Image (spheres, grey):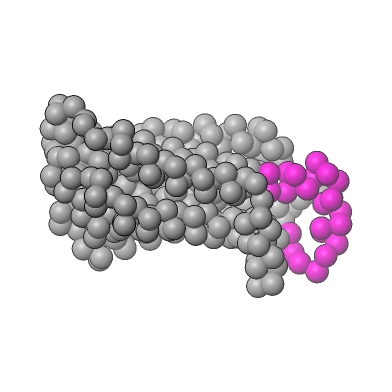
Amino acid sequence: MTAFLRQEVRTLLRTRRTKIIAVVICYALLVFPIAMKRPPQSMVDLAGEWFDGDGSFTLFMFAYLDLSMNKVSMFAGIILVGGIVADERARGELPLLWSKPITRSRYFLVRLTGAVGVFAGIYITATLIGTVYYPSQVSGFDPAIYLGMATVHLFAAGYAVTLAGTMGVLLGRKIPAMLVSLLLLGTFVGVAFLPFYTDSPWLGWLNPFYHGVSLIGQMTTFTPADMLAPIAALLAFHIATAALGAWKVSREEQ
């Protein structure tokens, strides 16, 4: 299983879609501060009212997580794993795959884990680049806050991969699975900050992307211990969704 996982990671790293995702994420990271150089004062004031911390840096983190990383992650997950099992079915390879000494559910989980791992590697690399690049570009930039929030958000961004991969096996066909994934992820991302606007945290309990950005409500006060609850919630989303996909693929017919 470990050898299969290593092979899957190496295969993904060589694909064009992985390279495109890496370029898009890094481009968004580098260009984003330019677009946020002179935000309207009204937006800065609103960010200070809705969230916690200094208005300009808070607005930057809100826009960075919502407009940049959430949107990029949503499409990256769909592109990276939208065709797990569905592609093999279209090529007529399933009978051969199911004849190998590996269970169907394990095959799915290894491929999904490899994709999540590759995406996490790209995300972490981009985040570390931002730690070096942003202090000279963003007024009031705090690397500790940025890294803490990005660490939690990583698990939400990675959930886009888990959900897209699971939809691929639940629906069985690539295009419908990608469209449904886009609809679900778009909804999650679109309402991720709704609990802050309405001052109703319960509205985000079933939204993984809310948990990914929840620390923005306590930017200046959160500690490493405060990161554990949203990470635990996100891990639960990953496990439940992946388990559903593993169960479905275990019942696949040849």
Give the image location of residue 101, x and y in percent. Answer: 80, 69
Give the image location of residue 108, x and y in percent. Answer: 67, 57
Q: Is residue 2 left or right of residue 44?
A: right
The structure residue drawn at horizontal position 31% and vertical position 36%, both measured from the top left corner, is 34
Q: What is the magenta range? A: 83-105
Give the image location of residue 57, x and y in percent. Answer: 19, 44
Residue at the extreme front of the image, as rendered: 136
Q: Quadrant of the N terminus?
A: bottom right
The structure residue drawn at horizontal position 13% and vertical position 44%, both measured from the top left corner, is 54
Q: Is residue 23 left or right of residue 254?
A: left
**Residue 53 can be seen, yes or no:** yes
Nearer the observer, 5 or 140: 140
The answer to whether 74 is drawn above or below residue 233 in the figure is above
The structure residue drawn at horizontal position 52% and vertical position 39%, both measured from the top left corner, is 75
Residue at the extreme bottom of the image, as rendered: 2
The answer to whether 22 is drawn above or below residue 62 in the figure is below
Nearer the observer, 12 or 140: 140
The structure residue drawn at horizontal position 39% and vertical position 45%, both measured from the top left corner, is 29
Q: How many marks?
A: 0
Nearer the observer, 11 or 192: 11
**Residue 50 can be seen, yes or no:** no
Residue 70 within the magenta-colored segment of the rendering: no
Give the image location of residue 139, x and y in percent. Answer: 18, 45
Nearer the observer, 228 or 137: 137
The answer to whether 147 is drawn above or below residue 197 in the figure is below
